[in-house]
Image (cartoon, grey):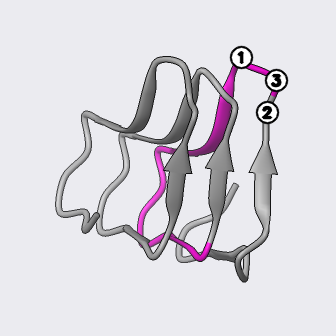
Amino acid sequence: GADDVTLDCAGHTVQGEGTGIGIHLDGRRGGTVTGCVVAGFAEGIVLDGTSRSRVTRNTVRENLSQGIRLTSSHKNAV
């Protein structure tokens, strides 16, 4: 839980079992999520109250509710 952190999955998969959130940036600034395959969750990638972050070069598939969700977030790049 810190600002200005990069999660680079280098093509690896974050796999769920149909519930929860795969990757969650909550109230952060300047985060980067890149190179991830996010599959099998209720929601794949969620930015909540997050600013100046980047979600780039990811594959988000087979999530039950939403692939990528931004809530109360601003100045992000997806």
**Looking at this rendering, what residue extends furthest in the front direction?**
62
Disc assigned to residue 19: 1
Q: Residues within 10 Å of mark 3 (few under 14, many from 20)?
A: few
How many marks the image carries: the answer is: 3
Residue 24 to residue 53: above or below: above
CB of mark 1 within 8 Å of CB of mark 3? Answer: yes
> Which residue is disc 3 drawn over?
17
Image quarter for residue 68? top left
CB of mark 2 within 8 Å of CB of mark 1? Answer: yes
Q: Indicate the amino acid at tag 2.
A: Gly
Q: Indicate the amino acid at tag 1.
A: Thr
Residue 59 to residue 10: above or below: above
Q: Indicate the amino acid at tag 3.
A: Glu
Real-space Cα distance between discs 1 and 3?
6 Å
> Which residue is disc 2 drawn over?
16
Which element carries disc 3, helix, strand or loop?
Answer: loop
Give the magenta range: 17-35
Residue plotted at (54% across, 19% down): 64
From the image, which quarter does the N terminus lie in? Answer: bottom right
Q: Is residue 59 magenta?
A: no
Real-space Cα distance between discs 3 and 2?
4 Å
Left or right relative to 65: residue 12: right
Q: Residues within 10 Å of mark 1 (few under 14, many from 20)?
A: some
